[in-house]
Each structure stands twice: as structure tokens, then as C-alpha cells.
Image (cartoon, rainbow, N blue to C red):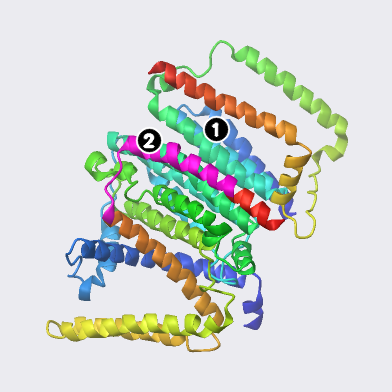
């Protein structure tokens, strides 16, 4: 009962925040609503018993990504952008795409029947073992290769940004 | 009554309420201690007017802040300007909930406690940035930009230093980290043949940078930016930022003490014959000495004004009373554990103030150099070395 209540509360926060991100005119306000939306997602992680993902979601997305977005927004002059029309010529195509994806999701939900709306029951950790340990075990044994590939990708991004910054000066 | 005390929510709620109620007072007195210490470093007296030796100065300051006009700049983003200090204070106080004052005396102990504290400090940065931006003025915006760059940079080194500690303790839960130190028979700062001390030094430097203290107080450097992100704030809202800053100092001190200095454990927790000297005699001597000094000051004050002497004597009596509490066998284990935790956090705060009184402010490029070119590589090396030594010792 409480679980379901909190699930819908966090879902509302995440989705409502998301809608406000794209409708605010002021870029800083958008970034802040993005924080709210991400906090809603973090709450859902907590509800599923994934405490590690909850903390990492906040540290990385809010403490890292949104912070840098804010940094850029404050450095770039966005006053003009705020006064521009918010909807441009492509809105019809975008609307069509959203409609198609929506129909697709609706179809699968309809086919899934009543089970589609049931919350997944979290897999409980073994005695004396937390979410962090489980995640580490899986990440560094079964999924080691994808994990390393992802780190390599990040490394490439770091080097790329350094190279780009060097070229300017 | 018994049912209330044994209810699982009783202790967390009580501790939480006590923290929220007492914290502003504690922060105000830390400020007094800071002003007095800085004055001492510079061979002057510091606040002396309100109360004996400035003892009532914090209360006067708090009253002034509460009664001051709350100015909001005309061009400011009103909603965000109002909300930003709330973010800072809220996150700093939330992090308090995870500090283990003693084994039982804490609000919550979650299995990712340390990460939640880091997450709270990450969200707390938003308060500074939003506050600086919402004022719609140049100095605050520059302060906000500087602070976001600084905090993001030093969070990396801080995180790596914390990883060293977590690796040794084998847990992210704050209570379990301290228990692990009891089992390993060593405070983590001295573990792994002294290698952990490097991690501790890195933690210390980045902790000072994370709390925006001198020599890393570039976000509010008063000689360059007036007051940085707080320039346009006044009255209670400024007070909230102030509160958040001191809360984060205590929190980061608490994290350092828990992770590296054995939390609530006394020195040499496994040597049983030191139990009485360190848990009873030391606190008793500490408080009685403080009381004695107060009494002597009180006698000297008698020449000037009677009520000042009386207040000073009452302070001394209160200190002596706290000291005598340590003789009670009933309150003893929790009390001495609490004493050691707060004593170590107090030492950390003293150290931070000492640093402030000693070092000049870094230039901005020096700050970034220290963060990225020295601390981060050193922290990575520390993680690697500690992991290797830890693995070798475990097998």
C-alpha cells in the first residue's frame, strides 16, 4: 500500500519535473526541474531496494551532470533564446514521432494485460550482503567486459575534450 | 512511558529533534570560538563586549540576523532567491541524520550511509549556484561559477580518498565503518602501514575546499568578489547560508572522524587497562580544567562588574557539572563515546580554524592545479597502493 503510494508519488515527481523541463522558458529553471525529475527517479530506485543506484543517481546526475549544465547555461548568454518562439517548424514531425512511440507502448501494455501494471518485487539480498556488494560482484565478474568498454568510452571523451580545449588556446 | 522509549522511532526522532534544535546554537558558538581563536592568533582579544569575554555575542548576533530587513534585489529571480538558502541548509542538516554520534545514538544507519552524505553535499552545491545566479548581479554570479568549478573538482579527490577508507573498512554504513576499526584494532588513518595517512591528508585538503573555507574560499573571496554568492543576501536568508556552512564543516568533520579517526572509539580501544584513564579521567580532567579557568576569569572580572563575574562562574559550574557526569556509572558508556566523537570533531574544527588563521588564499589557477594535477593523481595512487597492500594483508 505504502509502496504503491510512494511509487506513484515519485513517478509524478519524475514525470511532472520532466514536463516542466521542456516547458519553462528560462534555461536555469529548466535545469532545476531536471534536478527534481532526477530526484523522482532516485526515489524510485530507493523504492526498489537499489540504495546504491539511488545514491549514485544523485551524486552523478545532480552533483555532476546538472551542475555542469548549469555552469554552461550561466556562461552562455541565453537571454535571447528565452524570448524566442518555443515551438519551431518541426513540431508536427516531433508530435507524429511521439504519437507512434506512444501507440507502440500502449499496444504492448494492452497485450501485457493486467500484469503490466504490477510492480516488480525487488530481489532481496542474501544475509549479510547489501546492494553494493551484489552490484560489485556482478559488475566485476559477469559484466566485466561491457564495464571496461564503458570506461574506455569515458576515457576517450575525456581525452577528446582535452584535445579540443588545447586547440583553442 | 516504557512503550514510548522502546518504540523503534523514539531514538531517531529524539536525536533528530535535538540536532535541529541545538544546531543553530552550536554553530553560533563555533563562530564565537573561531573569532576568539583568530583573535588569539593575531594577538588581539576578539569580541569582549556582550557578556563576559563575549560569551553572549552569538546570541546578540543571532538576534541581529533575525531582526534585520530581508532585502531582495529588484532584478532578482524572487522564487529561486528565496529557495536557494533553503536547499543549502536542508541538505546540510539531512547529512547530520547519518552521522553516528555513538553506536546507538544516531538518526539512521543505512547501508550506503557514506554515499548519501556525499550525495547531500552534491545537492548542497546547487544552493550556492542557484543563490548566486538568482541574485542577478555580477559578483554573486562569479562566485557561483567559481564555487561550482571548485566543488566539482575537489569532489573527485574527496571521493577517491573516501574510497580508500571504505576499502579498508569494507562497508559504506557509518556504524559498520567504526565497528570495522574496532575489529582491525587500528584507526583507519594509521592502517596499511601508514599508507592510509596519505588518503587522510587528501581527505583533509579536499574537505576544506568542499566547505569553502580559507585557503580555498574563492567562492566568497571578499577582496575580489565582495562576498561571492552571498553578496546580495541579508538577514535571515544570509543566516541560513551561514548555518549551512557551519553544518557542512561539522558534517565533513564527522565523516573524517568516523572514517579515519575511529568515530566514537577512544584511543587504543582494544587496550582494556586504558578504559578508566581515557574514558573517565581524561574527560573529567578536561572539563574540570575548563571550569577552573572559568573560575579564575570570573574572579578577575569581579573588579569590573558583578553580573559578568557571576555569568562566568555559572559557565564554570556548568562545565564542572558536565565533567562530573562522567563519574556516573549509568550514563557512562554512551557518554564517553559521545565525548570522544565530539572531542575529535572539535579537534577537526580547531584545525580548520587554525588553517584559516595561517594560510593565505590561493589564486584561482593554483586552486585548479592543486585539485587536478596533484590531488587527483595522488588520490588515485593512494587507492591503488591501499588496494594492493590491503589485498596482500588479507591473503
Residue A123 within the segment the image draws in magenta: no
Seen as rendered, the residue at the extreme left is B303
The reply to whether residue B130 is in sight is: no
Q: Which stretch is magenta?
A: B358-385
Location of mark 2 (residue): B145
Q: The residue tagged with tag 1: helix, strand or loop?
A: helix
The tag on residue B136 is none
Label 2 packing within 10 angstroms: few (<14), some (14-19), many (20+): many
Location of mark 1 (residue): A20
Residue B365 within the segment the image draws in magenta: yes
Considering depth in this image, is B375 or B178 the residue closer to the camera?
A: B375
Considering depth in this image, is B360 or A116 the residue closer to the camera?
A: B360
Q: Do the residues bearing badges 1 and 2 touch, measured as CB atoms within 8 Å?
A: no
Q: The residue tagged with tag 2: helix, strand or loop?
A: helix
Considering depth in this image, is B63 or A153 the residue closer to the camera?
A: A153
Say which residue appears at 25% left-offset and 82% top-offset: B311
User: Where the C terminus of chain B falls, by quadrant?
Assistant: bottom right
Say which residue appears at 41% left-offset and 36% top-offset: B149
**x and y percent of residue B293 in the render?**
27, 82
**x and y percent of residue A164 in the render?**
47, 19
3D distance between C-alphas at marks 1 and 2: 24 Å
**x and y percent of residue B247 in the render?**
42, 58
The reply to whether residue B45 is in sight is: yes
Label 1 packing within 10 angstroms: few (<14), some (14-19), many (20+): some
**x and y percent of residue B157 in the render?**
49, 44
Quick check: B159 above or below B8?
above
Q: Determine which quarter of the picture holds residue B236.
A: bottom left
Amino acid at each position: 500500500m505504502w509502496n504503491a503510494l510512494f511509487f506513484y508519488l515519485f513517478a509524478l515527481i519524475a514525470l511532472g519535473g520532466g514536463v516542466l523541463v521542456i516547458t519553462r522558458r528560462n534555461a536555469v529553471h529548466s535545469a532545476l526541474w531536471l534536478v527534481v525529475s532526477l530526484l523522482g527517479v532516485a526515489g524510485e530506485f530507493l523504492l526498489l531496494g537499489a540504495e546504491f543506484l539511488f545514491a549514485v543517481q544523485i551524486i552523478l546526475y545532480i552533483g555532476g551532470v546538472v551542475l555542469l549544465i548549469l555552469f554552461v547555461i550561466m556562461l552562455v548568454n541565453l537571454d535571447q533564446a528565452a524570448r524566442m518562439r518555443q515551438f519551431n517548424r518541426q513540431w508536427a514531425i516531433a508530435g507524429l514521432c511521439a504519437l507512434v512511440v506512444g501507440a507502440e507502448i500502449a499496444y504492448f501494455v494492452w497485450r501485457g494485460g493486467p500484469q503490466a501494471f504490477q510492480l516488480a518485487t525487488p530481489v532481496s539480498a542474501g544475509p549479510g550482503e547489501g546492494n553494493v556488494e551484489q552490484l560489485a560482484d556482478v559488475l566485476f565478474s559477469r559484466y566485466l567486459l561491457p564495464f571496461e568498454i564503458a570506461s574506455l568510452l569515458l576515457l576517450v571523451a575525456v581525452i577528446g575534450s582535452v584535445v579540443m580545449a588545447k586547440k583553442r588556446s | 512511558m516504557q512503550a514510548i522509549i522502546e518504540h523503534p522511532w523514539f531514538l531517531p526522532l529524539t536525536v533528530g529533534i535535538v540536532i535541529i534544535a541545538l544546531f543553530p546554537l552550536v554553530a553560533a558558538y563555533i563562530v564565537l570560538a573561531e573569532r576568539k581563536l583568530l583573535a588569539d592568533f593575531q594577538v588581539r582579544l576578539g569580541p569582549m563586549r556582550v557578556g563576559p569575554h563575549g560569551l553572549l555575542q552569538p546570541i546578540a548576533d543571532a538576534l541581529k540576523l533575525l531582526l534585520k530587513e530581508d532585502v531582495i534585489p529588484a532584478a532578482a529571480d524572487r522564487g529561486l532567491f528565496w529557495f536557494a538558502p533553503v536547499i543549502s541548509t536542508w541538505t546540510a542538516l539531512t547529512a547530520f541524520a547519518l552521522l553516528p554520534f555513538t553506536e546507538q545514538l544516531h538518526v539512521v544507519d543505512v547501508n550506503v550511509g557514506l554515499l548519501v552524505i556525499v550525495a547531500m553535499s552534491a545537492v548542497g552545491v546547487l544552493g550556492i549556484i542557484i543563490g548566486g545566479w538568482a541574485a542577478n548581479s555580477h559578483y554573486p554570479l562569479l562566485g557561483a561559477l567559481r564555487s561550482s568549478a571548485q566543488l566539482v573538482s575537489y569532489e573527485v579527490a574527496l571521493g577517491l580518498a573516501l574510497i580508500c577508507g571504505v576499502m579498508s573498512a569494507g562497508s559504506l554504513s557509518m556504524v559498520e565503518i567504526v565497528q570495522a576499526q574496532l575489529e582491525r584494532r587500528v584507526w583507519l588513518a594509521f592502517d596499511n602501514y601508514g599508507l592510509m595517512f596519505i588518503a587522510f591528508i587528501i581527505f583533509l585538503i579536499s574537505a576544506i575546499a568542499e566547505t569553502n573555507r580559507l585557503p580555498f574560499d574563492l567562492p566568497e573571496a571578499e577582496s575580489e568578489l565582495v562576498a561571492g554568492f552571498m553578496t546580495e543576501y541579508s538577514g535571515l536568508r544570509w543566516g541560513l547560508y551561514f548555518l549551512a556552512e557551519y553544518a557542512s564543516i561539522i558534517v565533513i568533520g564527522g565523516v573524517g572522524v568516523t572514517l579515519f579517526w575511529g568515530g566514537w572509539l577512544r584511543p587504543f580501544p582494544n587496550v582494556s587497562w586504558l578504559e578508566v584513564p581515557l574514558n573517565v579521567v581524561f574527560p573529567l580532567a578536561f572539563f574540570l580544567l575548563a571550569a577552573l579557568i572559568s573560575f579564575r576569569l570570573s574572579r578577575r572580572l569581579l573588579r569590573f562588574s558583578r553580573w559578568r563575574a557571576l555569568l562566568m562562574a555559572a559557565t564554570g559550574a556548568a562545565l564542572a557539572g558536565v565533567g562530573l557526569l562522567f563519574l556516573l556509572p549509568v550514563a557512562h558508556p554512551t557518554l564517553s563515546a559521545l565525548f570522544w566523537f565530539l572531542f575529535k570533531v572539535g579537534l577537526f574544527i580547531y584545525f580548520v580554524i587554525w588553517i584559516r588563521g595561517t594560510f593565505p588564499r590561493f589564486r584561482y589557477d593554483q586552486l585548479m592545479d592543486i585539485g587536478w594535477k596533484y590531488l587527483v593523481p595522488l588520490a588515485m595512487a593512494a587507492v591503488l597502493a591501499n588496494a594492493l597492500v590491503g589485498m596482500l594483508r588479507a591473503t
